[in-house]
Every structure is written in structure tokens, then in C-alpha cells.
Amino acid sequence: MSPDHVSRRRFLRGLGVATTLGLAGCAESPKEDGDPLTPDRTTQTPIGGENAPIEELDGTDSSRFTEVYRAVRDSVVQIRVRTASGGTGTGTGFVYDDSHLVTNEHVVANARDLFVRYRTTGWREATVEGTDIYSDLAVLGVDERPDVAAPLPLLSRDPPIGTEVVAIGNPYELSGTVSSGIVSGVDRTLSAPNNFSIADTIQTDAPVNPGNSGGPLVDLEGRVVGVISAGGGDNIGLAISAPLTRQVVPALIETGSYDHPYLGVGLENVTPAIAAANDLAEASGVYVGRVVDGGPSAGVLQGSTGEESVDGRLVPVGGDIITHLAGEPIPTRARLSSVLALETESGEPTDLRIIRDGSAETVTVEIGTRPPV
């Protein structure tokens, strides 16, 4: 066993382990002549073989980023997809357990044929075991995982803002690429179908590009902070948080799907104008503009009853203001989405602290399940 592999095993054992953004990968490409999933002879050579980069050959430990890259790289895979329409797409994934990989739903959507490549192997077939469009997560089934490709640990809580992180993946099919940055924000949201959002996403300034989708964003101890999902200009990338991934992936492995908690309301942040029109002491909380007929909150929460003019602009009035959910303070919509996703379960009763007609009260809603796409 090489010193590099020994160092990597020790590193992981020490861890207890044996919105105008675009999707960060898997744009469909036109079908090429011949088999679009058959790489040429150069790409068949396992990374780390005769064409290995200099840093892999000389064994020099030049930085903390080098150390974490070497510890994690064998657990990151390159993904190639042939779609039903005959086009191809690419992305990234990483090892979750002995027989499963994690990637993005949008990487493998409409896949007819699916192949993955570890750093030390050629291309191998994989299967889609489960997908969830509301979290942009997917689980792939694989056989014969290389011994050096250890499962990566996922954080159980969002990291502090300012945490140094690296993104490892395959942008533009440039395999084994690493970029660095920090956690720029937490409790962000990404757009999802049916006017829903993906909660508790992690913002980073680590550069991510097409092909990075589904790859790990890790801290300098090699722990997954999030699953890279979207990136764009202005040094903003977004990743599905590790805590949300920890909730969704086991269900995808067991049943192929995941039930997202659902309140059945239309919400907006309390702005100064909404606060003024509704006689609130401060502009904080989430305003209930609409309650879905027949939804979990019907008959419990109250939506807008009218509008008033504030500085020449009509704003809604009469709706409930949510200030706490499941005992957690709710200053913004993004925070409500995160608490709903991580602290509640479909079918379970949950308390909400609200302000209605100027008075605070507590109501109980039985959490529902998001409707299918």
C-alpha cells in the first residue's frame, strides 16, 4: 500500500470514518459520432497512472488544501449520462456507503445509461436507486467499490460562516479538480418545482462550474458540508446542506423517494411596509398571505383579508405573522424553510407561535407532505 493511501486512511480514521444561479453541471450535450459514453484511450487511463499530475508523483505535502484533496479524491467519482433523447451529460458524485453514491437529481434526470469512474478505475455501470427533485439529490447503486474509495462523513449541523472549504469535482470534464473558498452564508434557498424552494442550502465563494454538480463541498477535515448544486457569477455557489442530505438520502435508499414536510401556505418576509400596515412592533417574521384550501394549515392559519396603501403602494393585511416554528425563532422565510425541513416531520403535529390581529397566540398544525411534481 502506498504512503499516500496510508496517510489517507489515517486521515479518515481520525474523523471516525473506516436567484439567477445556474445548475452547476450536467447540461445535455449533442450526441457525438459513435458511442458518446466511450472515452478515448487517454481518458481510459486511471487518474494517478502514467499521466498523473506532478503533485501526485512527488509526494510533496504543500498545503492543507493538498492534504484534504488527497484524503477525499478517491471517494469522488466522475459521472457520464446518456439520456433518452440520445444526448449526454456529465457531473460528479461521491461515496456515501459501501454500495451507494450521492449526486444531484438534475445530473441523472432522464438517464437511460449511466456510468461512473473512480480515480483509480475505468468507467463502470451504475443504477439510479432513488431521486428527489425537491432537494436535488439522487442516490446511485454501484458494485465493486475500490477499497481506497471510503465513504465521506457528512456534518450533522451547518458550519460556521467563514469556514474554509474546498469543492472537488469534474468541471467541464476536467477530472479531479479542486477549488477553495469559504462558507459565505447558510439558510439560503434554491428554487424547486411547483413554486417550492430547497431549504437550508450553503452559500460558498469556492468556484464551481458545469460538471461540479453532485460533488462534495468539504471542510479542511474532509467532512462534507454540502452537495454542490448550483453556481454562477459574482463568486456565489450553492450546495444542498449536509443536514438535509442526511435526512433525504436514507429514505432514497430505502424507498426511492422522500416525503418533504408541508404547511400549505403562501409566505413572504415581513417588510417595513407590511409591518406598518399590520401595526407590528418590528419588521420581523413571516407573513401568511394565502392558505391552501384543503391543506394542512386550512382552518388553522389565516391568510390576507385585504390590502392597504403604504407610501403609495398596496400591501397585504390581515394575515397571520409566524414568529416561531417547532420552538425555533423565525425571522425570515429562509429560516422557516430550514426549520420546517430539518425539525418537523410529515404527519406530526407542530406548534407555531403567531401574531393575529395584534395578539400573540400558539396554534398547532399537523404537518403534511409536499404534493408530487
Image (tube, rainbow, N blue to C red):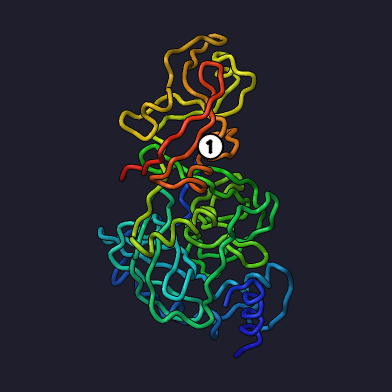
Q: Residue furthest right?
A: 62
Residue under label 1: 325
When the figure is inspected, residue 204 is found, relative to residue 273, above or below; the finding is below
Whole-percent x, y for residue 349 in the image: 43, 40
Helix, strand or loop status at disc 1: strand
- Is 63 on the left-hand or right-hand side of 354? right
Q: Residue furthest bottom?
A: 1
Residue in view at x 46 percent, y 50 percent: 23
When the figure is inspected, residue 302 is found, relative to residue 19, above or below; the finding is above
Please state which of residues 342 and 101 is positioned toward the viewer in this rendering: 342
Residue in view at x 40 percent, y 77 percent: 123
Where residue 107 sits, quadrant-wise, is bottom left
- Is 258 on the left-hand or right-hand side of 244? left
Whole-percent x, y for residue 109 in the image: 34, 57
Whole-percent x, y for residue 124 in the image: 38, 77
User: Where, quadrant-wise, is the C terminus in this rendering?
Assistant: top left
User: Dot 1 surroundings within 10 Å: few (below 14), some, or many (20 or more)?
Assistant: many
Residue in view at x 47 percent, y 72 percent: 97
User: Where, quadrant-wise, is the N terminus in this rendering?
Assistant: bottom right
Q: Amino acid at mark 1?
A: Leu
Whole-percent x, y for residue 118 in the image: 47, 76
Please state which of residues 365 and 179 is positioned toward the viewer in this rendering: 365
